[in-house]
Image: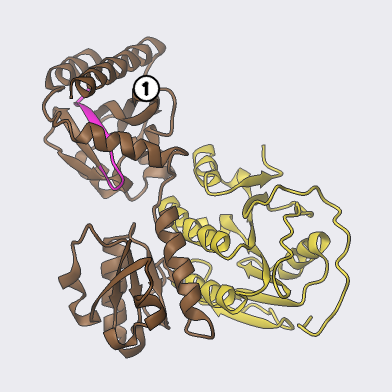
Amino acid sequence: MSRETEETPKKDRTPSLERPSNVLVESDASTLPSARRGQGDETAFVVVSLLSKTDRRIEALEGTYGEPDSVHVISVKGRADNGYDTVRTVSSSGDLTGLSMRIGEALSELHDDDVYLYFDDVTSLLQYTDLNTAYRFFNVLTGRITAADGVGYFGITPKAHDDRTVNTLRNLFDDTVGMS
Amino acid sequence: MTEVLWVGNPHNIPDGFAGSDAFNVRSVTPNRIEDAFPADDIDCVVYDPSDGTDDDNAAVLETVCADYPELPCVLVGNVDGVGEGYVFDHVPKRDGWVDVLSDVVRSAVERRSHVSYPLPDDEEGRLTEVEVVESLDLRGAFDRISEIGRYCFDTDMCFVGVVNDRRERFLSCHGGSVEELPREQSVCAYQILDGGVTVVSDVLEDPRFENRERLRELGMRFYAGAPLDIGGVRVGSFCIMDAEPRDLDDDESRLLRSFGEEVAEKISLLKELG
């Protein structure tokens, strides 16, 4: 996939949300609710892939927004994520410094585009850091996405956490999908 | 006006940023970073590491991100190799970066995007009310009711706390000598989100309070708090705490709520009297 690719976006197959910026998504959800922007020069996907499911997350985004002009991946060093417009790496799933840097780079580079970001996933990050630090990290990231008028989807496996953790994190998001 | 501390070479501050009507920018070099703190009037730090060493980078990030984690920090450059645990915004210097930086600083300050706990929906109005309450000089006004509360619930400590933007200040604390806590270390920061009585049976088992060092120092295991509703917002809490985990039954919960209402009524009355 490259910026030169021209495809007519597929028709939305999922319900539309009323302009949310950040959505907490149950990780097994295969479809994402649309929050289409349409103001940018191009459409860009950013997938932050702490798991090895990059293609599946891109497919989920394509199912909602059609084929993008570019795909940018941020993954853990050593994982085989090739063939995208840019691939940036961090040293581990808990490398908050690296994630802050690489996500900031991607969002700045795509400043003029409609950006749809998938963070995969919250549960993995919580294995490496405490809830408070994770909350701060996602608070900064969701704020950045809102400031860029982008849309962020954040995968989570709710059963892996107690209710207090999930309910605390919920406060950061405009909507949730597939979660009771 | 947003007060910005530029950490780095002052000659690198772009005109479009320093000259903005929205920002008042002052600067400090990385090797003098500690001279700039503590400073309650700083709203955001922008760190330009372009002239700094790895040691400078580590010192700045440790001072800002670790010691003042609620202060928004925006990095405009590369700091690879300083460790994995820092959280910040990042705006690389590329075409249009000054506009992006301005947007990011504005948004980070408005949204308070570096705090590690949820904020109430009506936080702005709540803080306005808190400011009025804090201006009343109520320190000590609730010593007697705190003493009665501690006796009634048979707990180690009973206190009345008001939660402002960055701290919880104790108007009264019976059984301890705590005057204030950083908001991020305060259980009441969560209590004010709750319309009813909040019970934390064992703080050590609750992921929301993991690594809260001040709570460990206080020996807090059990916490229960009732809201202080003043002018339709929750300015703080009437609380009990104990060094042993325990629960609160329904009668105790109702009683704690009554204590909270009693204190809130007195504050409202004192507020009317000026």
Which quadrant of the figure contains the C terminus of chain B?
A: top left
> Is A163 rendered above or below residue B231?
below
Which image quadrant is residue A124 in? bottom right
SS at badge 1: loop
Q: Residue at x 26, y 38 (%)?
A: B131
Q: Main secondary structure of the magenta part?
A: strand
Question: Across the whole image, how many numbered discs are drawn on residues?
Answer: 1
Q: Residue at x 20, y 39 (%)?
A: B218
Residue under pointer 1: B247
Residue B21 place in picture, x, y as percent: 37, 68
> Is B192 rendered above or below residue A48?
above
Is residue B53 visible in the rendered image? The answer is yes
Q: Identify the residue at the far top of this view.
A: B251
Which quadrant of the figure contains the N terminus of chain B?
A: bottom left
Residue A71 place in picture, x, y as percent: 71, 76
Residue type (three-letter) at the residue carrying disc 1: Asp
> What segment is highlighted magenta in the picture?
B155-167
CA neighbours of label 1 inside 10 A, class few (<14), some (14 to 19), many (20+): some
Chain assignment, label 1: B
Q: As rendered, which of A36 and B167 lies closer to the eye?
A: A36
Which image quadrant is residue B239 in? top left
Residue A49 place in picture, x, y as percent: 63, 68
Residue B95 place in picture, x, y as percent: 54, 85
What's the colour of chain A in the image? yellow
In the picture provided, is A142 more to the left or to the right than B196? right
> Is B67 rendered above or below residue B272?
below
Q: Residue at x 59, y 47 (%)?
A: A160
In the image, residue B131 lies in the stretch drawn in magenta: no
Is residue B216 visible in the rendered image? The answer is no
Which image quadrant is residue B71 in? bottom left
Q: Residue at x 85, y 67 (%)?
A: A9
* Chain that is brown in the image: B
